[in-house]
Image (spheres, grey):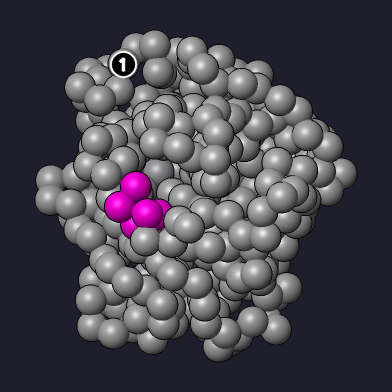
Amino acid sequence: MEGIEHISVSVNGISMHVAQTGQGPVVLFLHGFPECWYTWRHQMCFLASQGYRAVAPDLRGYGDTTGAPTDDPSKFTSLHVVGDLVALLSVVAADEEKVFVVGHDWGAMMAWALCLYRPDKVKALVNMSVCFTPRNPKSKPLETLRAVYGDDYYICRFQEGGEIEGEFAVLGTKKVLQCFLTYYNPSPLYLPKKGKLFEGSTDDLPSWLSKNDVDYYTSKFEKTGFTGGINYYRALDLDWELSAAWTGAKVMVPVKFIVGDLDITYNAPGAKEYIHKGGLKRDVPLLEEVVVLEGVGHFIHEEKPHEINTHILNFLHNFSS
């Protein structure tokens, strides 16, 4: 895209691809699954026009970032990813003690982890779709997910190495990406072993997602495959084990949280109560605002880029010197 520079940075044992544009205070954008830096194209160009430097890496296992061993899910914990990000900031924001962070989906989870492990690196956080999840020392994540949703729930289906990748290969990379990116249902996503994956899906694209957008994502995932992104799910229990020291710790940075009312995460059991009835504020004491956008699904920053851009800019202005 015009005005966006692409560089590779050696960090934490991997070569991280980074897209960046603009001059000014750094805003670090963290993408989710199945995405890459490109998902932030609208926000990057806008914030660059407003006097910020937008920096969006491909997280380990994604896009043009290389070096992470995708055959080893244990290398995809939040400790690894936060290590990548801290090392990246030492290069791209060497003159800044703290930076702004914006996250979505898995990027939101990594942003929460960054703020939990290294709050000294973050001025303020705008997080989307996935709210903070306090560590439950009595229950591993996968045990909980299986108990609530069953074995056909997509995160549970992701656990067996190579299995879901084989099923995705039958569907084709582009079809899989279209199904994920256009999933517009507040109900849980199931990928049954016995049955058609993404049954009922069509090739019709919503107005916010163009054929060129799908082609770009497809070109990246055809090169890397899906395993790198799926490894984040496969590392859930290990991440839970390794983060025991942060049990009960609070996120002590200023936060704005934005979610769509049709997002599957917002409609998960207990999510609305946790977000609106004091749980999130208890665990994130500097939470300043929760925004729920009506009629919006999971890919909120792509569906409503102008609204999201305004929300981000107004929040960042509060902390810009």
User: Residue 217 in the image: x percent, y percent?
Assistant: 49, 22
Q: Amino acid at mark 1?
A: Ser
Pick the residue in front: 35 or 194: 35
**Viewer-proximal residue among 218 and 157:** 218
The stretch drawn in magenta includes residue 281? no
Can you say whether 98 is above or below 88 in the image? below
Identify the residue at image location x=68%, y=46%.
Answer: 93
What are the residue bounds of the magenta stretch?
Answer: 313-317
Q: Secondary structure at mark 1?
A: loop
* Rendered position, 83 above or below 56: below
Specify whether 41 is left or right of 66: left
Q: Residue at x 20, y 58 (%)?
A: 292
Number of marks drawn: 1
Quadrant position of residue 205? top left
Examine the structure image and report whether residue 314 is included in the region drawn in magenta.
Answer: yes
The residue where tag 1 is placed is: 210
- Percent of width and height locating residue 108: 48, 55
148 is higher (above) or lower (below) than 11: below
Q: Relative to residue 279, is residue 250 drawn left or right?
A: right
Q: Residue furthest left?
A: 294
The overriding secondary structure of the stretch rendered in magenta is helix
In the rendered image, is residue 265 in sight?
no
User: For the residue carrying disc 1, how many other residues have a C-alpha within 10 Å: few (<14), some (14-19), or many (20+)?
Assistant: few
Q: Residue at x 37, y 74 (%)?
A: 287
Q: Position of residue 155 (x, y in %)?
A: 49, 53
Q: Nearer the viewer, residue 184 or 104?
A: 104
Name the side, left or right, on which 22 lies relative to 224: left
